[in-house]
Image (cartoon, coloured by chain):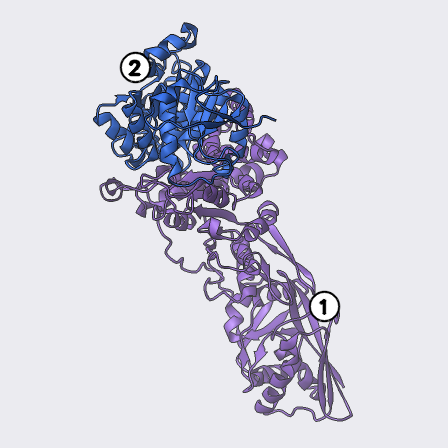
């Protein structure tokens, strides 16, 4: 007797439908699961058996073999439990009709169904593979319902699921609720006094998706400024939001971030993070790292120079390619990583270089500190801005500051100009595209030639300056890149050369 | 390869000015192509100098070097090294008086500077070969700097800086002492400001030095003094009025772009683009910490 149930495995953000085959043969009672499984799937035997018994069914006292096909694909996790139980029960009870349904869920010993990670990308994959119906744990229904073209049903327990398959019970139907979740309040730019240069740099970075480095003494407000950046960014498109939600679903962190929210993510990992945590990795199949969780949003590295050199170097490829491929023993997977990079650092170990308080570091410490940020990383940073310590008067007597909403409307206007021109942000344009997009005036071209000599710009450096200048012109609503825009773009680059 | 040699009061190239010292050295180790000449000027200051102090020392060294006046200093970090470098860059000669043995490179980071000084000037010391740079050697070394020099310029010094000991030795020996004034809030200039309060002549440009020491004035050919220091006549002319407005308001103290914006009532975007243009034209340089200062020339 043989029976099937469909489930799904993930491979990066893509899924692969998995056929769970159960065969029951005469012989000594045994329960084997094969098909490149990990430890969690092997342990499924000890969950499925009691769950079937406790649900009031009989576990066959014969030789039970379960195969997860395709058998050469490595599989991990507990989401196969439900499909394994359904396949085993169907092998003995032909009254159970799956009707083209797929199953995801972990079984508890008392036969209730527990939530699993990665349901959203798996639901999207199953829908694309032509599966009509998907049964998931109740808790995963809202995220699974976001996938188009598949009917989602929530099962609270194995009994409920089996009754449904017999045709005499119903499950909780998922209703697609794509209305954006209420946005969580974001820190507002208006709360920061003074810091005109830094705010301008944030506006440019937000408008073009550029990478930004802020330096300044401790307590000057770098972190606070960085945290206001999300409030300047426009909402994500629903496609982009779904892509982001799929990554969070894989990491099982949708509780921190509702799947329907349209706000771009903001990730600020601590500098003690492991490299796998930052770029993705882990044992077995690679999990998405912080850079992928920041996809379509902001990755903020506070105290940049405290991050190990290797961590920073690992960002080089994702910053350029906007995705990351992590190879592990079992297979290599790719995750999207299209993020804006924001760094903050002190200018020196004591933090007071160039500050009124005076720096107490010696020259060797300074060299060691600044060499933490290697040339290749510096080359990928578009804007550098210094954030000075504020005086009493700046903090308490200043005029009212511009709120984030005003800046955001300018950013949105600039972004729509970019969208009309190239269909994407300036930061993502190729060299050829930027050359045509950033048509510059004659004085601007002279300035650019001069800057190449004085700043020793690399080819990448030239293009980065042009992209930033293009964004500045977009903010000003100008068609051509003028001298002023170019000079401003160069100003934010010169600070890095020092 | 030049070998170090021992000179004493009987040697033909023994600097006669050393006899002004009460406790003159019995002899000196000398290593380099050109020994101390007269007249010469000592440029001294703190090891932990500010960037502007560093620039000032370098430009004084450069102007002296270009005028053919030898620069004497102590090859220490900070002001000393900047003065030596300035003189070397201008093609002048420079002498470093060490507080360690002639064959010891201290600080080790100055190995390259040391080679340059040996090639274009000399190192001298009264310490025996192989002597380590002990703390109490340095005040002793300062008296030699003061005795050799016709005048001593203190660029930046805190109240406890060794540069002030050089100034005291110089004053005792009747050498002219000049001090570069600084902001009254700058800790790095507190020592030089104190010197000025106590009657030391302020150094505002090389003209002050030549005026104070007739011996130097006689040594400098008129042609070397063509460009009067301090005047920026014509320097502003090449910029458009908005850029000139910024330059004119900048003064010499480093400022942050935000301060420029507040003072002139300009938006951060305009400030950034104008400063960018000035930086590229070489009229403004950016210092660590994001501050900007006008370039000296």
Q: Nearer the viewer, mark 1 or mark 2?
A: 2
Looking at this view, is A254 or A398 the one in front? A398
Circles 1 and 2: CB atoms closer than 8 Å:
no
Find residue A73 and name its label: 1
Q: Which chain is purple?
A: A
Callout 1: chain: A
Q: Is residue B64 above or below residue B183?
A: above
On screen, residue A155 versus residue B274, left or right, reads: right
Looking at this view, is A156 or A207 the one in front? A207
Q: Is residue A71 above or below residue A396?
A: below
On screen, residue A365 versus residue B146, left or right, reads: right
Inter-mark Cα distance, 1 to 2: 88 Å
User: Where does the image place residue A358, in percent across and percent down from the top left?
Assistant: 34, 40
- Secondary element at image label 1: loop
Q: Residue at x 28, y 24 (%)?
A: B171
> Which quadrant of the rendered structure holds the C terminus of chain B?
top left
Residue to which mark 2 is pinned: B212
Looking at this view, is A254 or B235 the one in front? B235
User: Where does the image place residue A327, in percent across and percent down from the top left?
Assistant: 67, 59
Chain B's colour is blue
């Amino acid at each position: 007797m043989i029976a099937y149930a469909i489930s799904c495995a993930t491979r990066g953000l893509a899924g692969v439908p998995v056929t769970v085959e159960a065969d029951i043969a005469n012989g000594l009672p045994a329960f084997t699961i094969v098909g490149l499984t990990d430890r969690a799937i092997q342990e499924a035997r000890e969950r499925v058996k009691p769950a079937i018994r406790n649900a009031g069914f009989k576990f066959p006292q014969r030789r039970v073999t379960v195969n997860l096909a395709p058998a050469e694909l490595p599989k991990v996790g507990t989401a196969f439990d439900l499909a394994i139980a359904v396949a085993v029960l169907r092998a003995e009870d032909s009254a159970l009709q799956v009707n083209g349904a797929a199953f995801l869920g972990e079984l508890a010993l008392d036969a209730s169904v527990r939530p699993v990670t990665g349901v959203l990308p798996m639901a999207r994959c199953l829908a694309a593979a032509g599966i009509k119906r998907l049964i998931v744990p109740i808790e995963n229904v809202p995220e699974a319902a976001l996938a188009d073209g598949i009917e989602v049903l929530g099962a609270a327990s194995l009994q409920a699921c089996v009754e449904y398959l017999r045709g005499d019970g119903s499950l909780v139907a998922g209703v697609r609720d794509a209305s954006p979740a209420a946005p969580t309040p974001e820190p507002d730019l208006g709360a920061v006094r003074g810091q005109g240069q830094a705010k301008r740099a944030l506006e440019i970075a937000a408008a073009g998706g550029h990478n930004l480095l802020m330096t300044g003494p401790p307590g000057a407000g770098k972190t606070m400024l960085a945290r206001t950046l999300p409030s300047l960014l426009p909402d994500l498109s629903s496609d982009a939001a779904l892509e982001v939600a799929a990554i969070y679903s894989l990491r099982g962190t949708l509780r921190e971030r509702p799947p329907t929210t349209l706000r771009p993510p903001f990730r600020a990992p601590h500098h003690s993070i492991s490299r796998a945590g930052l770029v993705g990795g882990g044992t077995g199949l690679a999990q998405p790292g912080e850079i992928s969780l920041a996809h379509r949003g902001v990755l903020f590295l506070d105290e940049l120079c405290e991050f190990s050199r290797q961590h920073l170097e690992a960002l080089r490829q994702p910053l350029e390619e906007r995705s990351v491929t992590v190879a592990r023993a079992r297979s290599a997977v790719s995750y999207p990583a299209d993020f804006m990079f924001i760094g903050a650092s002190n200018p020196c170990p004591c933090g007071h270089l160039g500050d009124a308080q005076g720096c107490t570091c010696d020259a060797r410490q300074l060299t060691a500190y600044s060499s933490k940020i290697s040339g290749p990383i510096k080359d990928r940073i578009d804007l550098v801005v210094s954030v000075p310590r504020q005086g009493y008067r700046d903090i308490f007597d200043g005029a009212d500051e511009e709120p984030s909403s005003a800046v955001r409307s300018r950013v949105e206007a600039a972004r729509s100009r970019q969208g009309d021109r190239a269909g994407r942000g300036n930061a993502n344009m190729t060299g050829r595209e930027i050359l045509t997009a950033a048509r510059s005036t004659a004085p601007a071209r002279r300035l650019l030639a001069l800057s190449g000599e004085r700043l020793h710009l690399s080819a990448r450096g030239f293009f980065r300056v042009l992209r930033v200048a293009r964004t500045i012109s977009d903010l000003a609503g100008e068609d051509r890149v003028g001298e002023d825009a170019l000079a401003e773009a160069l100003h934010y680059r010169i600070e890095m050369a020092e | 390869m030049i070998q170090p040699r021992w000179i004493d009061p009987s040697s033909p190239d023994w600097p006669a000015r050393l006899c002004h010292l009460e406790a003159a050295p019995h002899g000196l180790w000398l290593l380099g192509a050109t020994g101390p000449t007269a007249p010469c000027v000592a440029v001294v200051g703190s090891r932990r100098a500010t960037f502007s102090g560093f620039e000032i020392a370098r430009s004084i060294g450069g102007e002296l070097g270009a005028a053919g006046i030898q620069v004497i200093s102590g090859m220490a970090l900070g002001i000393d090294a900047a003065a030596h470098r300035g003189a070397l860059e201008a093609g002048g000669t420079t002498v470093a008086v060490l507080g360690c043995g002639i064959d010891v490179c201290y600080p080790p980071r100055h190995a390259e500077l040391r080679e340059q000084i040996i090639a274009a000037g000399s190192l001298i010391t009264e310490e025996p070969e192989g002597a380590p740079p002990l703390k109490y050697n340095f005040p002793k070394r300062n008296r030699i700097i003061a005795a050799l020099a016709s005048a001593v310029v203190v660029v930046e010094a805190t109240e406890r800086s060794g540069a002030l000991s050089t100034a005291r030795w110089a004053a005792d020996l009747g050498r002219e002492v000049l001090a570069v004034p600084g902001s009254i809030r700058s800790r790095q200039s507190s020592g030089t400001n104190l010197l000025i309060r106590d009657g030391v002549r302020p150094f505002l440009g090389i003209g002050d030095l030549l005026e104070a020491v007739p011996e130097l004035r006689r040594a400098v050919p008129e042609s070397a003094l063509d460009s009067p220091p301090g005047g920026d006549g014509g320097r502003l002319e090449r910029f458009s009025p908005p850029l000139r407005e910024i330059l004119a308001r900048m003064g010499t103290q480093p400022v942050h772009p935000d301060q420029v914006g507040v003072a002139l009532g300009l938006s951060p975007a305009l400030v950034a683009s104008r400063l960018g243009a000035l930086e590229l034209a070489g009229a403004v340089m950016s210092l660590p910490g994001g501050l900007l200062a006008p370039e000296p020339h």
